[in-house]
Image (cartoon, rainbow, N blue to C red):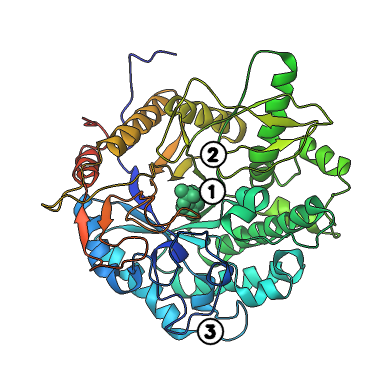
Amino acid sequence: MIITKSKKLPENFLWGASTSAYQVEGANLTHGKGPSVQDVKTVPEGTSELDVCADFYHHYKEDIALMAEMGFKTFRFSVAWTRILPKGFGEINQEGIDFYSDVIDECLKYNIEPLVTMFHFDLPYEIEKKGGWSRRESVDEFVNFAKILFENYGDRVKYWLTINEQNMLTLVGDVIGTCNLSGVTNKYKKLYQENHHMLLAQAKVMKLCHDMVPGAKIGPAPNISLVYPASCKPKDILAAQNFNAIRNWLYLDMAVWGRYNNLVWKFLEEHDALPDIEEGDMDIMAQGHPDFIGFNYYSTATVEWNEANAEASSGDQQGGSCEPGVYKNFSNPNLLHTEFGWEIDPDGFRATVREMYSRYHLPMLVTENGLGAYDKLTEDGKIHDDYRIEYLRRHIEQIKLAVSEGVDMMGYCPWSAIDLISTHEGIVKRYGFIYVNRDEFDLKDMARYRKDSFYWYKKVIATNGEDLG
Ligand code: BG6
């Protein structure tokens, strides 16, 4: 639809940006923090270890002041489970509790709403050693961790996110460094059992949040990309429906409605991979109600029909995967790509939010969206990232159009507030509004610089999205 009568964004629209603990904090094994799976993984060749990152742990005051200067209404950050509970269970690390308490207070000092992700790819290593999410006990371990967060921060944090990109943990955990499939005979059985436990944990935590923190709002944060069919061939449509179910709707159907998506159920049955479900599990699922849907969006996916005898392969967060008899990745010729080969699709952003809203009718909060690029610091201390401005502008335009069409959008938190370490492509793949002066292996002085996108975003926020120029 071409919109000529557009609506303004709501006055209380939550403008901000996001980070995650293991990618930004540094101090990864100090100040009482225990190891997570991210701290023990072998980092991809040519990329930095995760011990310093952007050193947010020591720079948070300066960084939050810069966010305040941009006019942030919210800041999405994650809590490292092992900074609170070094083993993931048992003894609490008071220094970790105090650190996030200080971060929250620092946000509130500037009227920035803390938006807290409980779990962003950093499962405690002690839990992983015992079998991680594949054990039933992991559900209670996560609930216990959440309870500690609500007890300590519930008086000040009104917005919570449960699990970041649970769908990517299930689909591409090997790329993110969270899953080890060596010696596993049926990977689907393992992955979807883990997924079942995460879904249960999430449902319990959403209920707990409502019980313990009256007035708080909580939601999931999957990575949602509408899946296009490669053509109007009927079989390509079926393939797109298959991948939409596997990639997207499984996670949101369960979070919102508390039931398994029927196409995914059939897919798992075909692979002898139905999760073990205990009595009462589906009641628990039905009791967890999100107040909103948080979601990460980078681009759409496109697939075509795939014959049963094709070879299987997995991709990364942006697709590339292939399931025999189900779908096969298709490179969309209509889209541009980032320097790192990710497709760019602002129209698909609107298509994705339209589809989500028509399925779930809940308010939606963009928890990630952004462009990774090789930014360059000039000799006079500038970063001319006009390509990022262009990417963000075109996506915000689509949010405004979606709002005009009646979609309920709560806010926009692009990735990332500040440069940090990418999941598998190092610090040189930069996303931030704030430049951190370090290279892959040379830590330099870690000084912060305002990129051109910093000043642009400041103006966008000040005009509540009216001036995108
Ligand atoms: C999302 C994650 O998958 O995308 C982030 O939630 C991640 O943790 C972001 O950094 C961008 O991906 P990448 O691989 O470029 O870091």
Q: Is residue 123 above or below residue 247?
A: below
Q: Earlier in the sequence, mark 1 or mark 3?
A: 3
Q: Between tags 1 and 3, which lies in front?
A: 3
- Locate residue 324, reporting x and y percent: 79, 34
- Locate residue 9, reporting x and y percent: 33, 33
Residue type beneath disc 1: Asp
- Locate residue 428, reporting x and y percent: 36, 53
Q: Is there a contact, CB below 8 Å, between mark 3 and mark 2?
A: no
Neighbor class of circle 2 (other Cα within 10 Å; few <14, some 14-19, many 20+) is some
Neighbor class of circle 3 (other Cα within 10 Å; few <14, some 14-19, many 20+) is some
Q: SS at mark 1?
A: loop
Alpha carbons under labels 3 and 2: distance apart: 35 Å
Q: Specify whether 309 is left or right of 37.
A: right
Q: Is residue 28 above or below residue 114?
A: below
Residue 92: mark in rendering: 3
Q: Between tags 3 and 2, which lies in front?
A: 3
Depth check: give the residue in front, 418 or 282. 418
Q: Earlier in the sequence, mark 3 or mark 2?
A: 3
Res 178 seen here: yes
Depth check: give the residue in front, 169 or 379. 379
Q: Quadrant of residue 49?
A: bottom left
Residue 291: mark in rendering: 1
Q: Specify whether 4 is left or right of 80.
A: left
Who's the residue at 50% across and 32% down the image? 353
Who's the residue at 49% across and 34% down the image? 299
- The residue that mark 2 highlights is 362
* Extreme residue toward the front, this view: 46
Who's the residue at 76% across and 52% down the image? 192
Residue type beneath disc 2: Leu
